[in-house]
Image (tube, helix red, strand yellow):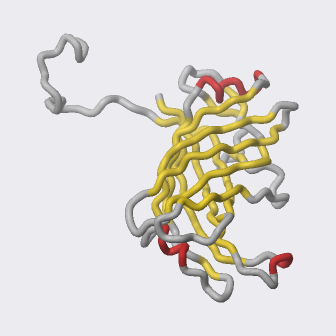
Amino acid sequence: MTALDSNLTWGERDALYAKHLDYVFSLEATFRLLAPAVFGAKVPMRVVTSTEHEWDTFHVLDENFMRTPNGILQQVPRAKLAFGNDAILIRDDGAVALEGTFVFETDTPDRLSMHYSGALTLAGGTQRLCFEPDEESAGPKGSAFIASTQDVANPKYCWMVKNRLIGVGQVTTVWRKTPQEANERGYWYLKFDYDLYIAS
């Protein structure tokens, strides 16, 4: 019997739909706010590229392959963030929207792009980014959830194009200055640590 054949009305189901999430890889991305946070404003932020790690995507168990819901082994992407942008609304409570793009250099000749949307929640609201400490210090922590679609030409990672990914992440913030900005004001940095899954 399908939902169309059933005489049940809305809300009369007595069981949850079957679901499963398969972990595929993790991603670290650090953004810098490009302007001071002002309450009620939508502040742009951009990915800070780093040479600290060879790759920004990884598998927490150091696996080189993962299995997609169709049972086929696929390679875990090896990719380095080349660009990323987003913006966050500064408000006092609740979740704020995330909607941006990551562009990666991969271990193939082709770039990988990831378009995502979701929500970010910071303890005390994103309004806490309006307050700039005098010295470098840790700021509020929170969580982030995204859903993404991917584009890549190389067949090695074509499984990513065919699947929508779901990201569950933790967010940490820090106020800091770089050595080149010693005489300037500091900036808020937001570090997103995502675990990405395929739903089946």
Taking depth in this image into account, of 22 and 129 the one nearest to the observer is 129
Taking depth in this image into account, of 184 and 152 the one nearest to the observer is 184
Q: Residue at x 46, y 56 (%)?
A: 96
Residue 65 appears in which quarter of the rendering?
Answer: top right
Image coordinates of residue 190 in percent, x first then y, are 62, 64
Q: Is residue 141 above or below residue 99?
A: below
Image coordinates of residue 54 in percent, x first then y, are 83, 51
Image coordinates of residue 98 in percent, x first then y, are 53, 50
Q: Residue at x 70, y 24 (%)?
A: 158
81 left or right of 25? right
Q: Is residue 100 above or below residue 184?
A: above
Q: Quadrant of the N terminus?
A: top left
Taking depth in this image into account, of 105 and 87 the one nearest to the observer is 87
Image coordinates of residue 151 in percent, x first then y, are 69, 29
Q: Residue at x 72, y 80 (%)?
A: 185
Q: Residue at x 77, y 41 (%)?
A: 78
